[in-house]
Image (cartoon, coloured by chain):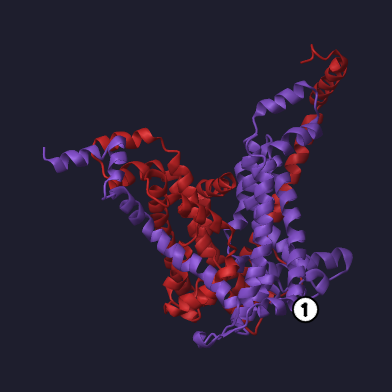
Chain colours: A purple, B red
Amino acid sequence: MSIREQISSITRTEEGRRRQTIGSVDRESIEGYLWSLPYLAAFTVFLLWPLLKGLYMSLHNWNPLFPSESEWIGLENYVDLMSDPFFWNSLWNTIYFVILTVPTMVVLSLGLALGVNRNVRGKKVLRTIFFSPYVLTISVVAIVWLEFLSVDFGPINYYLNMFLGIRPEWLTSELLAMPSLGVTTVWWLLGFNFIILLAGRQGIPERLYEAARLDGAGTWRAFRDITLPQMRNSILFVVIIQFIYQFQVFGQPYIMTTGGPAGSTRTIVYYLYESAFNQQAYGYAAAMGYILFAILVGVSLVNYFVIGGDSDE
Amino acid sequence: MSDTDPRTDGGVDAQAEESLLDRLTGNRSLENVGVHAVLYGVAALFALPYLYMLTVSFQPRSEAIEAIPHWIPQTFTVEHYQFLFENSLIVQWTINTFLIAGISTLLILVADSMIAYALSRMDWPGQSVILVIIVASFMVPYYLNIVPLFTIVANLGLVNSYLGVILPAVASPLGVFMLYQFFKDIPEEYEEAARLDGFSNFQIYTRIILPLSRPVMTALALFMFVYNWNAFLWPLIVLQDNASYTLPIGLVSTLNAQIYRPGRTMAMALLASIPLILVFLVLQRYLVRAVELQGVTE
């Protein structure tokens, strides 16, 4: 056995690997980098680099055709945003949308998850039905609901007209447009939350409920003192993830209302999209992205400390 | 417990008896009926949009725009489907979507599992920093990057190309994190034994790690396929030519037609969702697993 072979057989053991690191050729390090390279390349070029470039762009009056001629304007984009009524309007619209959808979705999916977790017939069928809209693209969802909510031809208005004599202008009145997008969204994404909460409920040991039953606790007591605390993490996860996700709503207003009527469904991401790709205000849009990023990081940190502070229990 | 606390003893027993009484008198089964009624009621409401889509797509236009909604077509027609196959780009869009979602998923699986392997099974300087950066990048909201990302993709000459959609999809950190969590829990012993037998990293990866991770890889693959099939905002920005659209974008581009034709729109929506609905029905448990895993990882 040559020395080289001996060395290479030694390096296959833990001890050998540790010794090898002391030497000048660290094969494992090189391999580590090589194995990471494909992902890191994509990650760097298409995630990290835009993140930094966005910050740089936000400090410029960006010229999309001749980027090198972009003018450095410092924080002017940020200052302008603070006094832009469209920005504030879209921020409130987005918050309104989040308030409409997130609590509804979480409460409804929790109810359905607890229901399906009971001793019901056809669990699989129910799960399939509740979860299935989640695999549809927003285009399909939006198109189907456009027809559903159609003022003159939609089935909803037909029955409302028949029983109550009203034909609400779902998507063309300022009052109802956003709630209509909310209903569409709840139908579309409820299943995601339902699956996570169902898994959370199934993770609770049954003996806790047996013990409670022996102690004479009723359904409500068991729900309040066992189900809710035990499902705390899944519920918090669902709330936070939905908050972040719904904050970025775009497809629904883009397809169903084009931000109208009178800008009442123009959300933040929609406004960002318009600023960048309709008005070519790239620097302005990039600054908008950063302000929202700051908001979401704040929320995520709160989330991290709320959930993280409790996880050792 | 009741021995140590005699005060509540009687009350507890009484309550326990009450619920037993409930059960005997059938209150339970009444409640059970109620639960079933609510669950199936909601399920029926959930299914209505599907039924409507299906029905309208087989109705002639005259029937679809009648005031009364017909939940079952009075006159059955396939004219909308025929029209779409003969006069629209829907086949092209389906192919585009399939290629984009398929290639993205494949690249994601390869790249993510490789780095997850390096992060979990090898020792190299800087790996913990890289892991932290990748995990932290979860916090970067998607839209934050779209403007600078578009300029980068444009500089690379990838606007209006499949690659312009695919490559940014590979940068998603979700799969790396999911696979890392899974790989690091695979017991060291498997690997030690293999190393003693002279296995290289590549052999350990292909013969031990990957076969052991088939469930999590399948879940990730399915989730990514569905996610990229359905992606809307980014393809909308990058794909600017009718023939290069994916289904979600193509579908919306047809909405601007002057004449209101609900049947044709619904037929198109249905055709666009059939592939995923089929995938969903066959592989639902993997997708459920993928969603559950996300709940666990965070």
Residue A91 x %, y %: 74, 70
Three-letter code for the amino acid on which mark 1 is drawn: Pro
Which quarter of the figure is the N terminus of chain B placed in?
A: top right
Q: Is residue B257 left or right of residue B289?
A: right
Identify the residue under disc 1.
A85
Residue A185 x %, y %: 69, 61
Residue A169 x %, y %: 80, 73
Dividing the picture into quadrants, the one containing residue A59 is bottom right
Up the image or down, B189 lies above or below B56; here it is: above
Mark 1: which secondary structure? helix
Work out whether residue B29 or residue A205 is closer to the camera in this orientation and state it. A205
Work out whether residue B297 or residue A147 is closer to the camera in this orientation and state it. B297
Q: Is residue A183 left or right of residue B145?
A: right
Residue A310 x %, y %: 67, 39
Kindly identify the residue that appears in the image at 21 percent across and 42 percent down: A8
Kindly identify the residue that appears in the image at 46 percent across and 54 percent down: B130
In the image, farthest residue toward the top: B3
Q: Which chain is indicated by disc 1?
A: A
Label 1 crowding class (10 Å Cα cut-off): few <14, some 14-19, many 20+?
few
Up the image or down, B107 lies above or below B297; here it is: below
Up the image or down, A42 lies above or below B208; here it is: below
Q: Is residue B56 left or right of residue B124?
A: right
In the image, farthest residue toward the left: A1
Residue B73 visible in the displayed image = no
